[in-house]
Image: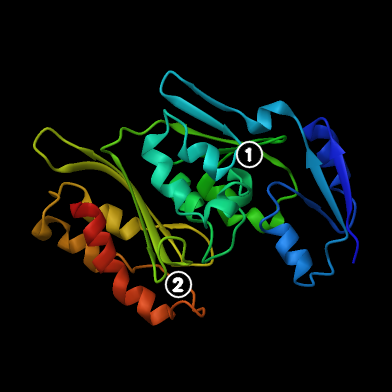
Amino acid sequence: MALALQTFATVKDANAALKAVGTRYLGGGTLVVRAANEGDVSVSGLVRSTEPSLSTIVIADGKVRIGASVTMSAIARHPDLGALAKAARAVGGPAVRNMATVGGNLFAPAPYGDFAVALLALDAIVGTDDGETPIEIFLANREGSRAIVTSVSFALPKADSFRFLKVSRVKPKGVSVLSIASVLALAPDGTVSMVRIALGCMADRPMRASAAEKALIGRTLTADGIAPALAAAGDGTSPITDPIASAWYRNEVLPVHLGRLLLA
């Protein structure tokens, strides 16, 4: 089936074209083109925008704005985004990272979307032509969204505050068994004063480990200190079952890998 491709100079014009039945936005193409190639007959046309802001990374005053068309490879090699390089490199192999975009990763279904897990831990704000939305709300409602994602923004984390771990059976580019990202802050006495933990593959989209976060506050990053958080890690999760791993297995290994991340 032939797909019509329309290219627009502005996001506003591309958004207007997306109102047509059967159209999908084309970023890097790693999701929508794959779906079309696999026989998704609901896709009849592709829309893209070449607006320059979509492909730029701006860092100023401790804040980061990444355009939705920025690729994983561009993030991985950016000199000021070293803290995020590991999460960017977790997305597929080199060929995929050269195409996969920040905006597209927000829509990737589990077991994909590893970079979106990192963005959730960073409490990112998702920008569209309609405005800005906290990433947690955006992810919860992403199926109903027709507005083109234009950017993600977040506070630049300190290298020692942001942690990311991807668990896969095939190294270095296997599909995720699960992925975990966290942002931590410690009080002067060494106890956890702030924490955000995001999980991938523990639901159909990235989710917060809220119970584990609550259990970590006021605790030290020691085996005994994190034990309550590990016990609560699976609360509220609904892991997927796929050819990579069962829901049972993901639940079993989550505390093990969360512990490794926190004690790293």
Q: Residues within 10 Å of mark 1 (few under 14, many from 20)?
A: many
Q: From this viewpoint, is residue 234 visible?
A: yes
Who comes first in sequence, dot 2 or dot 1?
A: 1
Query: Closest to the observer: 37 or 251?
Result: 37
Q: Residues within 10 Å of mark 2 (few under 14, many from 20)?
A: some
In the rendered structure, find residue 68 and report the number of the disc placed on it.
1
Asked which secondary structure carries label 1, the reply is: loop
Q: From this viewpoint, is residue 122 visible?
A: no
Q: What sort of colour scheme is used for the picture? A: rainbow
Residue where numbered disc 2 is placed: 238
Q: Residue at x 78, y 37 (%)?
A: 49
Image location (x, y in percent) of residue 75: 50, 38
Position of residue 141 relative to residue 53, above or below, is below
Position of residue 154 relative to residue 101, above or below, is above
- Three-letter code, disc 1: Ala
Horizontally, is 28 left or right of 189 in the view? right
Q: Residue at x 36, y 79 (%)?
A: 249
- Three-letter code, disc 2: Ser
Query: Closest to the observer: 183 or 6?
Result: 6
State which mark lies toward you, 2 or 1: 1
From the image, which quarter does the N terminus lie in? bottom right
In the rendered structure, find residue 111 and report the number of the disc placed on it.
none
Q: CA distance from mark 2 to mark 1?
A: 28 Å
Are the residues flagged by discs 2 and 1 in contact, CB closer than 8 Å? no
Image location (x, y in percent) of residue 48: 79, 42
Asked which secondary structure carries label 2, the reply is: loop
Image location (x, y in percent) of residue 239: 45, 72
Image location (x, y in percent) of residue 219: 14, 50
Q: Residue at x 83, y 39 (%)?
A: 14
Q: Residue furthest top?
A: 61
